[in-house]
Amino acid sequence: MLILKKGRFKTIKQVSMNKIGIFFGTDTGSTRLVAEKIYNALGEGIADQPKNVNQTRVSEFLLYDAYILGLPSYGIGDLPGIQTGCMEANWAEFLYKLDDVDLTGRRAALFGLGNQQRYADRFASSMIKLYHQVYGLGADIVGSWSTEGYQFIHSDAVVDGRFVGLALDHRNQSHLTDERVNTWLAEVTPRLLPDTAAAA
């Protein structure tokens, strides 16, 4: 169990808890780019600057009650990490640090990148691994996304006919990324920050 010390750290906690924490893992930089798009669309009043999980402490992650978590697809639907060929630590290594953390009462929305043409048989499949890990820690997952407009054979990230989060193909459908991000955020933000939505 993490115990936050009094003083400066507590003050940061009070401020950040009212915002969405955006965390991502990346290898080529594409997931970082989408995370920045999401932040720019939400604005600094709703979200904090995106953070790479390989530069994030567990204490920083736990400042938030609401998350947007992003990852690329790697291997055959594996969590990206050193063992799957990433050049740097990624979600596999960060989630290991969260093994004893309880996220009950917190909310998370996921986005995952994939390539429909090259990996049509496992498009954005790594997203389901992150889904199971975060859900297993007690978080409520929101923000499922329609499969309409995509062309792929199979994705492990499709549950009950919908992606478990926002699926993006920034290589083959980059012209749709901004529209998909904005539409998804309009749906998911009130569910991540219900108190803010009610006040508005």
Image (cartoon, helix red, strand yellow):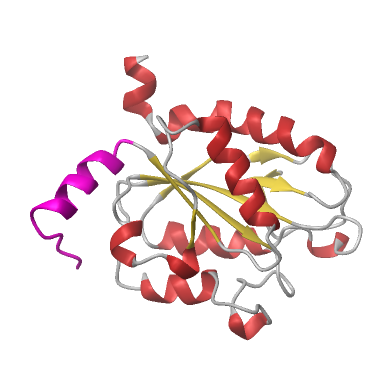
**Percent x, y of residue 94:** 45, 71
Image spot of residue 36 (x, y percent): 59, 45
Q: How many marks?
A: 0
Which residue is farthest front? Answer: 8
Give the quadrant of residue 86. Answer: bottom right
Quick check: can you spot residue 102?
A: no
Q: Residue furthest top?
A: 200
From the viewer's perspective, is residue 57 above or below residue 110?
Answer: below
Which residue is rendered at x = 34% and y = 47% of the image? 106
* Residue 125 in sight here: yes
- Of the 4 image quadrants, the one containing the C terminus is top left
Residue 85 drawn at (x, y percent): 68, 82
Reply above or below: 194 against 26: above
Q: On the picture, is 99 further left or further right than 187? A: left
The residue stretch that appears in magenta: 1-18
Q: Looking at the image, which residue sits at the far bottom?
A: 83
Whether residue 99 sits left or right of residue 80 in the image: it is left
Q: Is residue 197 magenta?
A: no
- Which quadrant holds the N terminus? bottom left
Q: Going by the picture, which residue comes out furthest to the right? A: 117
Nearest the camera: 95 or 31? Answer: 31
Q: Residue visible at 29% across and 51% down?
A: 63
Picture layout, residue 195 above or below residue 162: above
**Which residue appears at 49% of the width and 31% of the height?**
43
Q: Position of residue 57 (x, y in %)?
A: 35, 67
Which residue is at 57% across, 26% downward? Answer: 186
* On screen, residue 189 above or below 91: above
Q: Is residue 25 left or right of residue 136?
A: right
Q: Is residue 17 inside the magenta stretch?
A: yes
